Image: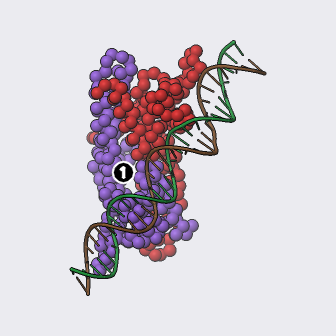
Chain colours: A red, B purple, C green, D brown
Amino acid sequence: MEFKEAKNKFVQTWGALGSQWGINKTMAQIHALLMVSNEPVSMEDIMEELQISRGNTSMNLKALMDWGIVYKEYKAGERREFFTAEKDLDELAVKIARERSKREIKPALKILKEVSTIDANNSAEEKHFVDQTSKLYDFVLKADNMLDKMTEFNENWLGRLVLKIMK
Amino acid sequence: MEFKEAKNKFVQTWGALGSQWGINKTMAQIHALLMVSNEPVSMEDIMEELQISRGNTSMNLKALMDWGIVYKEYKAGERREFFTAEKDLDELAVKIARERSKREIKPALKILKEVSTIDANNSAEEKHFVDQTSKLYDFVLKADNMLDKMTEFNENWLGRLVLKIMK
DNA sequence: TTAAACTTTCAAAAATAAATGAAAGTTATT
DNA sequence: AATAACTTTCATTTATTTTTGAAAGTTTAA
């Protein structure tokens, strides 16, 4: 396999993976492209390589910057803006984890708390509901806290964690 | 908040969460409904509660059973089939983790290995590509192994893991 | 073996999500 | 302050995903 083919395959795969995880295909593809580029890439080049429109490129770059995993760069003497991706994978994982926790887990926890604290009359049905949603609340809370803890390590947290778990 | 409202809120929330994680809304809603039901539910009842068609219900129940997180049950003297969800949350998390690893992570790893082993000519560009995709391969492999390890604990693995990490 | 009671399948329709591109906006240069 | 170089926005179009529902399939019981 030659470079161009490999690069394309990587970008496509990363894009497909993204869409299975609630991130849109183009956003993931742009990220993939930037991640394997050794130097900052212009909007024009992204459009060209992925064959997508200007608007689409702009919106998805904005989203990636909101997630804090893509940065704008300016080159001396160049009017255009260039973009680079966070390339440190530990840092990338931490940022993604934080963002998803904030956007998805925290709001879900809020609802879980609400619904798990209704007062059940003494029907088995309502008791079971309260019991199950309470357990779910505890579980999700614990998982979310764990994410925090994990990513607090920082600096190769995954490696360290693996060590910790192994022994 | 009264029971019916709480139940509905829970089902809607779980459904929305599902669609952010690549699981379709109805599938997640059915799962939510079954999870908080203290007894097996018939297809008819699911259709009624969620206001969805027979075909949709059938397909999504099948998918849930493929994931191993919903079971068919037969009631003595009843012709119809009933359904229940896996209610043990540790078990549920393990099954979801295993399934996603199998369906998404493993195939992605295969591609990462392929593209990271092309031989780069000596351009900085190609070297960077190989370097970055190799790192990604290692990272994803490590994360996937960790998932395995975590879920191997079984029996309140999350709780145990939290303890392990804290100290 | 027939009929009734139920479930599954899948082509078509509907709903949802993403992409386009032209117009509006912004910034830097002369 | 006018113009050129570039980016963002958003109403509309396009593509993708999900849902429907009727027909086909299956199972049980008489």
Between C18 and B26, the one nearer to me in the picture: C18
Query: On the rendered image, what quadrant is the C terminus of chain A found in?
Result: top left
Front one among B24 and A46:
A46
Please, is residue A13 above or below residue A125 in the view?
above
Callout 1 secondary element: helix
Rendering coords of residue B28 (x, y %): 43, 58
Q: Is residue B142 in view from this perspective?
A: no
Q: Position of residue B63 (x, y in %)?
A: 35, 58
In the image, taking residue B97 as reference, residue A145 lies left or right, namely right
Q: Which of A78 and A130 lies nearest the eye of the viewer?
A: A78
| Res. A152 image quadrant | top left
Residue identifier under label 1: B158
Number of numbered labels in the structure image: 1
Kindly identify the residue that appears in the image at 42 percent across and 22 percent down. Answer: A38
Residue B70 in the image: above or below residue B162 = below
Name the residue at 38% across, 36% down: A12
Can you tell which quarter of the image residue B130 is in?
top left
Q: Residues within 10 Å of mark 1 (few under 14, many from 20)?
A: many
Give percent across and percent down for residue B99: 32, 50
Q: Is residue A136 above or below residue C22?
A: below
Residue at left offset 39%, top offset 41%:
A16
Amino acid, disc 1: Leu
- The residue at 33%/16% (across/down) is B122
Q: Chain of mark 1?
A: B
In this rendered view, identify the residue nearer to me: B147 or C9: C9
**Which quarter shows the N terminus of chain A?**
top left
**x, y percentage for residue A129?**
45, 67
